[in-house]
Image: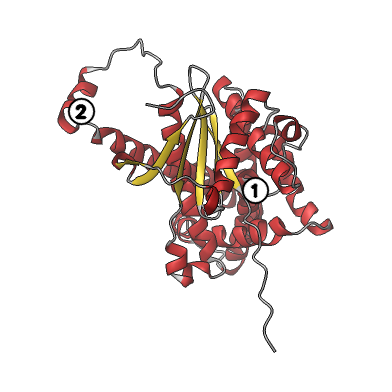
Amino acid sequence: MARRRKAKEPPNYGGQAVMEGVMMRGKKGYAMAVRRAEGSISVVEGSLSNIAQKNPILKWPLIRGVHALVSSMSLGFASLSQSADIAFDGIEEEENPSRFEKFLFEKFGDKIYDFMKWAAMAFAILFAVGLFFLLPSFIGDVTNRFTPVPSAFIGIVEGFVRIIIFVGYIVVVSRMSDIQRVFQYHGAEHKAISCHEKKLELTTKNVAACPRLHKRCGTSFMLVVMVISMILFTALRTVFPDWNMWLGFASRILLLPLVAGLSYEISVKWAGSRDNFLVRAIIFPGMLIQQMTTAEPDDRQIEVAVAALKRAIAQDTPHKRRETKISLPRWKMRLRTEAAGYGGRRK
């Protein structure tokens, strides 16, 4: 008897808001749409790495979550940087470069920009680890030293401190005008994906009517990371009640891959493909946080999200793709930048 072939599941699209735009990621490639200063939309698209196809171990549970997180962060930082270049292209800067900046440019040329971008990415990662993992651990150790409470309870205190810092950070940055626009594009990204998942035509009207909250959002994933880390580190404090502060710091960093892998399996692989009472209960706190990290977009922002998603979908349907590409060695990848149909072609 012939075996029935398992039907291929349609790809789940995700993405992120960037400067004056949206990046959408599919199964085979990604597309980023950015509103330029003069009003047109530039679309940049490229292929995703197929390293997971060549190395089956990267598809194993837990490991696939770490790989997905690293690749998403890498693409996200690159997209943020490139979107800023596109969005602010043509806008004259009033401030002249300093002598030090002139020296660096004369010494290293265009390479200095790549170095600065990687340095900014490294600083952002270190800042996030320090703020959301090491600082709560330090507060927990201080609390354990000066209060007569069980060591296991300190793990719970540390977890709540981490969540409070996370929410407080969002509240502070949400007051910045530039970040508010990013949150609007974040809402447009969610609306466009929801519209596609409902199998509706990707029009401005249909997208605008869709919800701006989504259960596979990175904000919800971060909250799951914090809950998982609270459970894990509480268990460790129970088993090792006498560990010192430096051992605690080391454990936070060394166990980050495990925390990320567990969080991915729960929030993306399990909750992301199901809809029941337990799933809704687990994602409910993350949906509340999304009330702050997303905002209602206007029609122009929705147009940008739709442009990005349509190109991402086209990446997964080869017969719809055009073959013309422009090689940009600066980004060390093959990209296609277009604004055809949106007001002109980017130079």
Task: Give the camera-side residue of 67 and 282.
Answer: 67
Residue for point 58% across, 60% down: 233
Residue 21, given in percent of the width and then of the height, sits at 54, 31
List the residue tagged with mark 2: 104
Q: How far across and how far down the image is residue 344, in percent?
A: 47, 24
> Which circle, 2 or 1, is nearer the viewer?
2
Kindly identify the residue that appears in the image at 20 percent across and 28 percent down. Answer: 104
Q: In which quarter of the image is the C terminus?
A: top left
Residue drawn at point x = 63 percent, y = 50 percent: 221
Q: Please, is residue 192 above or below residue 226 in the view?
A: above
Mark toward the start of the polypeptide (2 vs 1): 2
Q: For residue 122, which quarter of the picture?
A: top left
Spatial CA span between label 2 and label 1: 40 Å
Q: Is residue 148 visible?
A: no
Q: Where is residue 245 in the image (x, y as percent from the top left)?
A: 47, 54
Looking at the rendered structure, which numbered label has been put on residue 223?
1
Question: With 224 as the anchor, is 341 left or right in this view?
Answer: left
Bin the neighbour count of mark 1 within 10 Å (Cα to Cα): few under 14, some 14-19, many 20 and up: many
Residue 345 left/right relative to 96: right
Which label belongs to residue 267?
Answer: none
Tag 2's secondary structure? helix
In depth, the one of 138 and 281 nearer the eye is 281
What SS does tag 1 mark? Answer: helix
Q: Nearer the viewer, residue 30 or 341?
A: 341
Task: Give amino acid for label 2.
Answer: Leu
The quadrant of the image that shows the N terminus is bottom right
